[in-house]
Image (cartoon, grey):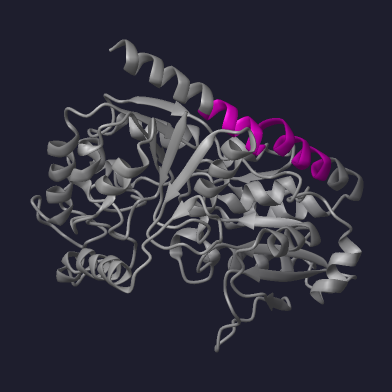
Amino acid sequence: MKIIHISTYDIAGGAARAAYRLHQGLQAINLDSKMLVQDKFGDDTNVFAPQTSLEKGIAKFGHFLDSVPPRFYRRRQQSEFSTQWAPDRIIPQLNRLNPDIVNLHWINESHLQIETIAKLKKPVVWTLHDMWSFTGGCHYTQNCNKYINSCGSCPLLGSNNDFDLSRKIWQRKFNAWKNTNLTVVSLSSWLAKCASSSSLLKHQRIEIIPNGIDTHRYKPMNRQILREILNLPQDKMLILFGSINPTSAPRKGFYFLELALRDLCKAGWQDKLELVVIGSSKPHNQKDFGLKTHYLGCLSDDISLSQIYAAADIFIAPSIQDNFPNTVLEALACGTPCVAFNIGGMPDMIEHQGNGYLAHPFEVKDLAQGISWVLENRERYQKLCRRAREKAEQEFTQEIQARRYISLYSEILSEHKAY
């Protein structure tokens, strides 16, 4: 069985890292797995990307073309919005590799045109890392549910026109995919429910297979030694927060963490806690949270990331909307309890008062309460740490994920041959 994964990147960014981990997991159990990416950051010889300056230039120009249409909406929010109308060169590459199954992942930034998906002659599995596949262009809808019908008057575009860019993209998807047989894989129960209620994917088969992680690499380690290596204090409890652009992306909820930290300081925690931020360098105008803050910058290698997770006492993910963030999974695997709002895919990973705390959505006082509840009792804290690691080992290893996909691939191929 030969599987080709199509992803914009291999290891850069959360969705890309998740796709690459699946690729690794399948290889580990001797499946023929390869990746087609637009930009390659690793050195895996089974990951293929444009090689020549011309090919790389075409890819960059396509990304530029895709970014132009939303710019005509001057009241648009600064949220990711993908049009996917620039031509691609995926079909010739797939023909050369001749896979049995094509597994799509995060394919934006002009990597794969909407219309190309219907032209793939092999069975297609589409692993959803966000909501883009069933919306009119946005990756997260915030409070909008227009994807249930047909999009239009898009709040992210600041549009009052029913026939705006979001409706046009939705229409392109509808026309291209209406006779296409896709198998959709959602990472979380929440996203599966959204996809099944959407006008674009409700007739497709939808399965739930969460991300997997290398639990031999992401594991509990000696916290004292790690803090010495990372030059972090030994006598403080460390709150860890991070993602791509963690402090500037509104969806990641840094604003709520700021308020919660101020509440904790007022409650007498200011001399016990310090904050660690990954994914962002120290800003020029650093805010005062009442706590000393360590900005460790952007990290993508597993060794550095696992050390930081294991060195922290607690990981906070105050996202407003999120599917199945790798950061939470990585923290749990390192035995670090997590606190988040009870939204999206968080309850698929975080067991309330079992391996962390699920706060009522967007209630700052409950978020602060969750942090203090996790940290205030050392005996209870050790139980939370043990359960965090157990959860990762029992449900989220790369091997478990790979075998679930192999079972799905085999079933699809059997049906395809019978048809």
- Nearer to me, 256 or 138: 138
Q: Is residue 29 above or below residue 146?
A: above
Position in image of residue 43 (x %, y %): 56, 61
Describe residue 48's horizontal placement relative to residue 272 as left or right.
left
Please give the name of the residue rendered at 57% of the width and 46% of the height, measured from the top-left corner: 21
Describe residue 228's horizontal placement relative to residue 295 as left or right.
right
Please give the name of the residue rendered at 45% of the width and 59% of the height, measured from the top-left corner: 251
Please give the name of the residue rendered at 50% of the width and 36% of the height, measured from the top-left corner: 188
- Nearer to me, 386 or 13: 13
Residue 396 drawn in magenta: yes
Describe residue 361's horizontal placement relative to residue 234 as left or right.
left
- Nearer to me, 98 or 9: 98
Position in image of residue 304 (x %, y %): 71, 65
Q: Is residue 271 visible?
A: no
Q: Bounds of the magenta span?
A: 384-405
Location of residue 100 (image quadrant): top left
Q: Quadrant of the C terminus?
A: top left
| Residue situated furthest top in the rendering | 418
Residue 386 drawn in magenta: yes
- Nearer to me, 163 or 103: 103
